[in-house]
Image (tube, rainbow, N blue to C red):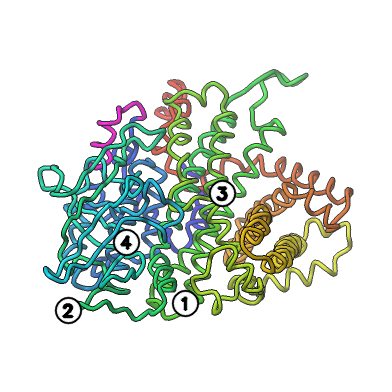
Amino acid sequence: MITPTGQALKVSLDGRFHELKEKWRSEISSADIVRDPTLPMAEARVWALEKLVDLASRGFAVAGFPNHPGTVAESVAHFEMLALGDLSLNIKSGVQHGLFGGAITNLGTSWHHERFIDGVVDCSILGCFAMTELGHGSDVQSVETTITYVPETDEYEVNSPTPTSRKAYIGNAGKDGRMAVVFGQLVAAGENQGVHAILMDIRDEDGNDAPGVETGDQGHKGGLLGVDNGTLFFDHVRVPRRMLLNRYGGVNDEGVYESEIASKNARFFTMLGTLVRGRICVGSAAAMATRKALTIATRYALQRTQFNRPGAGGEITLLDYQTHQRKLLPNIARAYASGFAINVVSEQLQRVNDTRGSDPTAARELETRAAGLKATLTRWTNDTIQLCREACGGAGYMTENGLTLLRQDADVFATFEGDNTVLMQLVAKALLLDYKKSWGELDMIGTARSGAKLLGDRFMERTTAGTTIGRLISNATLKPEAQKIKARGWHLEMFEFRERHVVEGLARRMREAGKSDGQAAFEAVNDCQSHMLEAARAHTDRVILEAFVEAISGVRDEYVRSLLIRVCDLYALSTIEDNRAWFMEHHAFDSGRSKAVTDAVDGLCKDLRGKAQELVEGLGVPEKWLNSAMLEPTREEEAAASAA
């Protein structure tokens, strides 16, 4: 049974999505959502598809579609809950509903919605999102597949002109997909209009390749065995003109290309911007997988003992050791911080979706935040799941205890929906570029030559808790030096100082780089890449902290509020500690303050150790979904529970 404190923490962390998430926890059993980790690939694929169809038929896993219940923000919450069960099932849904269905929803028109969305939702139309090619992954604008208008028959011809234009790593393409949204260069009247997307058949109802389409199964992978990744190659395949997803441009009834967005660059980034939900979902799913790993590792640390306690009898519980507290508790604090940040960006997604592109500044800010969170959270996920495995010793290496499956399935989250390094570069560019002047200009040299104008009041502005944050910073300046380390305002001030200093330094370097030409310009800008990544990390850390502060300001229960304040302290101070070399190099504080930060982190870990059980309960992972044999009660515990 969950403790009252654990329940209250869970309500706070769920935020406005609590009712939806509780419906999952109360109505979805482990049999519905937890995969046997020993299933072979073929059986894992069958399992994932069967479970997805079943969940969709019951109204789970799907939201955010035209004329269907559930908002876009709620679709992120559904995706989070799927990630707590099985990541193959999670990504199977992400491909079918998030990518395939999302592309039809956001890039198509009402005709496409009326004809295809019902089948996408109930999985009677299984589809793929065919963007990545062997030759081009992150550089989507340079994909080689062509979509050429043929006026004689009023069709498009989809073709893979080179071996490197083969679509690769495509979810659902290996076996289950019957249709695909294919991205390629649209050519009309001899002119290339840039990347567009077309909906087309890739297999018939019996699973045979459609005429002119060659599918391939990429087979066994390092994880996500329930997802059938594959390849697609097209040999001059004719597709009816109306199948182009033409919300932002296409050939009209007169055979002429038209678009309300004149600039090819602007059109491309507008189209990609509508697909931002995928990055939010991947980041949020990674964070949920980490919550599951932390719950397993912490519960194990609360029951596992090692070595005798001197003079007191009995063995010492793992979590009583400072080093073990240091492994788990700062990451639990980061799990809370990340959860609150995902809640904020989900609501931001909803606002942008509701305006249907009428506020391009808000849309670009959303894309920046989504990119930063996705890269930050998936990196943290890979590091932390490995740490949790190690924290459980040999037991953590046993498949039956749940951590090895999480580790292998979460690995690729750092790569898909945007390589993390590329995404962090996009965040840095957004921090540097004036939005109105740089619409679509995201190449590095163009970035430098734009003058690297800081956005200041736009991307650097605070969250909706700005008033609270400003007050906290002001109050911190009035405190004696000895008390500042405990002041939230000082934490915020340090995060803001780091971000602003790094971004301003990057801007100066980019201005100088922009004065060069040709290869020299590339080399100068290329030398700034590590600086760009640091700017993006500093920005995203600040965004996450402010989301935590905003969430605390809305908690009414004083005890839970006080507990969350300590958890937020741990997140803030452990992040400062991780970056203390930078702070000392830039004279933000001296070695004495650095040692005091470490002492404070140690103290908070010791203080919160007694609340570890409640804290992991608050992470919201149903016990029945943990799928960890080492946490199952012993016969004695079961007998005691029955007697009670």
- The part of the chain drawn in magenta is 37-49
Disc 1 secondary structure class:
helix
* Location of residue 614 with respect to 587 vertically, above or below: above
The picture places residue 568, in percent across and down from the top left corner, at: 66, 55
Task: Return the mark for residue 360.
Answer: 1
Question: Does 524 sit left or right of 638 as displayed?
Answer: right
From the viewer's perspective, tell me whether residue 156 is left or right of residue 105.
left
Q: Earlier in the sequence, mark 4 or mark 1?
A: 4
Task: Compute the Cα span from label 1 to label 3.
Answer: 31 Å
Residue 359: give x, y in percent of width and height. 46, 79
Name which of mark 2 and mark 3 comes first in the sequence.
Answer: 2
Residue 335, labelled with which disc? 3
Say what amino acid the circle numbered 1 marks: Pro
Find the distance from the CA under tag 2 to the CA under tag 3: 52 Å
Horizontal arrangement in the rendering, residue 614 relative to residue 471 (left or right): left
Q: Which residue type carries mark 3?
A: Ala
Labels 2 and 4: the sequence-earlier one: 4
Name which residue lies at 60% across and 56% down. Answer: 560
Q: Which of pointers 4 and 3 lies earlier in the amino acid sequence?
A: 4
Give the secondary structure at mark 4: helix
Q: Are marks 2 and 4 in contact (CB under 8 Å)?
A: no
Q: Which mark is residue 102?
A: 4
Mark 2: which amino acid?
Answer: Asp
315 or 630: nearer the viewer = 630
Q: Which residue is mark 2?
A: 253
- Say which residue appears at 22% left-offset and 40% top-offset: 175
